[in-house]
Image (cartoon, rainbow, N blue to C red):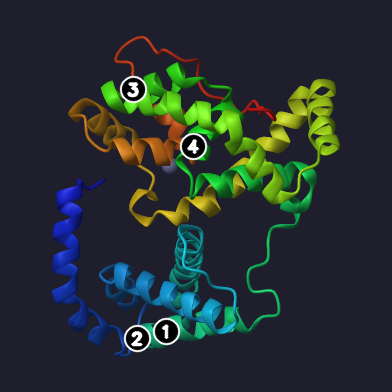
């Protein structure tokens, strides 16, 4: 379930006092997959912290670190990526000491020649375009809101209806759209080096073979979304339909909705009709890429 701000703060405080005992247990030997699951499931925040701070140290030591939001989110994503791999492979590594297994997994990743390699499809023009806007969305709210337009063709009114926002929050959505159109999009394109010719080529491919193009886009969008969603561990987990319903009817979790729905096609398709209570204000979201803002 998704937590409110207060609950999260409370958990953080509690986490502080529990932390030493949890770490204590993690450096003891676990002998069965069940024991492994039990030990690590109680310590996920501690393990994420550990994987993240190793990654930060690695970037510092190799001169790739700077103090900004983009780098903070980058190490969070990779920390989460390592943690996921650890959860999958750890069960087959028993007996082991979970803490040391995580350490060695992260160290092994960092010693590879290309530790942060990308999916090869993200190096095509379409892949670079999508990676560029989704990467930007992890650090800029304008870009995050822009994703609703680029992936599904939504305008500000659709975003507000879909996420069930009201009042001042809705005004912000209009501003986000405006700033993204005025300068944000161009800046994101410059950052990934998309040329005018490449952008035109994407548009004409879409005109010639809309179905194939949007299908290919959906595959890459899912891949990029899954990766960049990890930038925000609190907003990362997917919800079931009843959980989404509860969130919309009880009126909490606005930040979670805006972030997660922009970055999760599956939840978007689960939750699309909940914001408008009754008749859906937007058609069921499907990927229909918009190259221009
Ligand atoms: Zn989801």
**Is mark 4 in CB contact (under 8 Å) with mark 3?**
no
* Among the 4 quarters of the image, the one containing residue 214: top right
Q: Is residue 240 left or right of residue 226?
A: left
**Is mark 4 in CB contact (under 8 Å) with mark 2?**
no
Question: Is label 2 in a helix, a strand or a loop?
Answer: loop
- Labels 4 and 3: the sequence-earlier one: 4
Residue behind mark 4: 142
Residue behind mark 2: 31
Mark 1 nearby-residue class (10 Å; few <14, some 14–19, many ≥20): some
Residue behind mark 1: 94
Task: Single out the mark in the foreground, 4 or 3.
Answer: 4
Mark 3 nearby-residue class (10 Å; few <14, some 14–19, many ≥20): many
User: Residue 154: percent from the left, percent from the top?
Assistant: 53, 21
Task: Single out the mark in the foreground, 1 or 4.
Answer: 4
Name the residue located 62 percent from the left edge and 36 percent from the top edge.
185
Quadrant field for ligand 1: top left
User: Residue 167: percent from the left, percent from the top?
Assistant: 27, 21
3D distance between C-alphas at marks 1 and 3: 44 Å
Compare residues 89 and 112 and report the one nearer the observer: 112
User: Residue 263: percent from the left, percent from the top?
Assistant: 49, 41
Name the residue located 37 percent from the left edge and 84 percent from the top edge.
99
Residue behind mark 3: 274
User: Residue 177: percent from the left, percent from the top?
Assistant: 50, 27
């Amino acid at each position: 379930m998704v937590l409110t701000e207060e609950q999260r703060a409370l958990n953080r405080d509690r986490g502080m006092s529990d932390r030493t005992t949890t770490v204590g247990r993690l450096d003891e030997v676990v002998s069965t997959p069940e024991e492994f699951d039990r030990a690590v499931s109680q310590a996920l925040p501690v393990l994420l912290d550990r994987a993240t701070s190793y990654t930060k140290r690695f970037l510092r030591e190799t001169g790739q670190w700077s103090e900004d939001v983009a780098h903070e989110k980058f190490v969070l994503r990779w920390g989460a990526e390592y943690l996921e791999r650890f959860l999958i492979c750890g069960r087959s590594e028993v007996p082991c000491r979970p803490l040391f297994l995580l350490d060695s997994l992260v160290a092994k990743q960092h010693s590879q020649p290309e530790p942060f390699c990308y999916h090869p499809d993200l190096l095509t023009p379409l892949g670079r375009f999508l990676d560029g806007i989704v990467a930007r969305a992890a650090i800029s709210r304008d870009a995050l809101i822009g994703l609703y337009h680029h992936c599904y063709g939504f305008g500000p009114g659709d975003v507000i209806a879909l996420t069930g926002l009201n009042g001042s929050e809705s005004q912000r959505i209009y501003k986000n759209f405006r700033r993204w159109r005025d300068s944000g999009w161009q800046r994101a394109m410059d950052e990934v080096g998309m040329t005018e010719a490449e952008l035109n080529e994407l548009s004409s491919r879409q005109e010639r073979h809309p179905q194939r193009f949007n299908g290919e886009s959906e595959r890459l969008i899912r891949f990029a979304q899954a990766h960049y969603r990890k930038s925000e561990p609190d907003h990362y987990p997917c919800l079931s339909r009843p959980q989404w319903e509860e969130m919309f009817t009880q009126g909490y979790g606005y930040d979670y909705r805006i972030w997660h729905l922009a970055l999760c096609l599956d939840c978007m398709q689960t939750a699309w009709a909940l914001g408008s209570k009754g008749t859906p204000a937007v058609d069921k979201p499907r990927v229909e890429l918009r190259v221009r803002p």
